[in-house]
Image: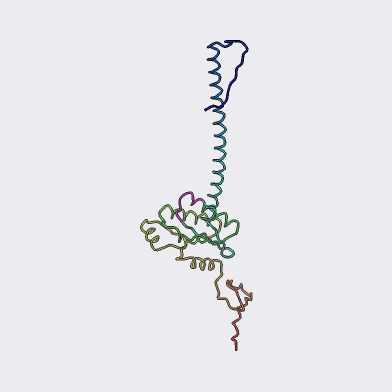
Amino acid sequence: KTVGAMVVQSYRNYAFSDQDLSFLQAAASQVVVSIEKARLFEETQQTLQELRVAHEQQSRLFGIVRELSTPLVPVTEGILVLPLVGTIDSQRAQQIMDVLLQGIAERDAKVVILDITGVPVVDTSVANYLLQATQAVRLLGAECVLVGITPEVAQTVVGLGVALQGLSTRSDLQGGVEYALKVLGQRIVKSTRRSPLLLEKPAAPGEYTPRPTPPVPSL
């Protein structure tokens, strides 16, 4: 492969000796090596830049995936739901902890519902992660409710001898929401055409609370 040419000209016959020609050939070889090194260095820098861009894109994608894997959903004022899907390892457990604590602080939540219906395996480490999250939530003045425990997961937890004392549990998300509303002193009432009221708070002493007006039968 030719990368360049070195031209040496003289008006005298036999101006260069064999030693001079050997020197010129060695110098030309060094120039070729330098040119190749410069080309390889430029290609390496370009490849590194492409890798940096790909790494940044991958990091952003992982961030989006992490956010989607731990969505903190507000149900009503003071109640948050965190549905969990997939395997929970140490890295994801830390992410769950961060999302929970940040969401409680930002929304001033009083009850957080952890729905583990989509978690296929709950072993000792996962149970410990959930207990740690519960303790951290309590330090912020909120309460944590665990829902979505399947019969298989319940048998596994009992078989492993995992202690879940102090952790409120309900069978499904509906039970968890009802429990959270009860903690906040609220309840779900049936709506009518005249009153779309869904949540009802108990009246304080001496306070009048309007009741939904029953529908008038049509003639």
Q: Where is residue 45 shown, x and y percent of the image? A: 57, 35
Viewport quadrant of the C terminus: bottom right
Q: Nearer the viewer, residue 148 or 7?
A: 7
The single residue placed furthest to the left in the displayed view is 159
Identify the magenta region: 86-94
**Residue at left 50%, top 55%?**
133
Residues 155 and 135: in front is: 155
Along the line of sight, the residue nearer the viewer: 47 or 82? 47
Left or right of 38? Residue 117 is: left
* Residue 10, above or below 207: above
Q: Reply above or below: 216 against 131.
A: below
| The quarter of the displayed image where residue 49 is located | top right
Residue 186: image location, x then y, percent: 56, 70
Quadrant in which residue 54 is drawn: top right
In this view of the protein, which residue sits in the foreground, 210 or 28? 28
Expressed as whole percent of the image width and height from the top left, the position of residue 74 reads 57, 62
Q: How many marks?
A: 0
Q: Residue at the spot x=56%, y=66% of the render?
A: 184
Where is residue 181 drawn, in percent x and y?
54, 67
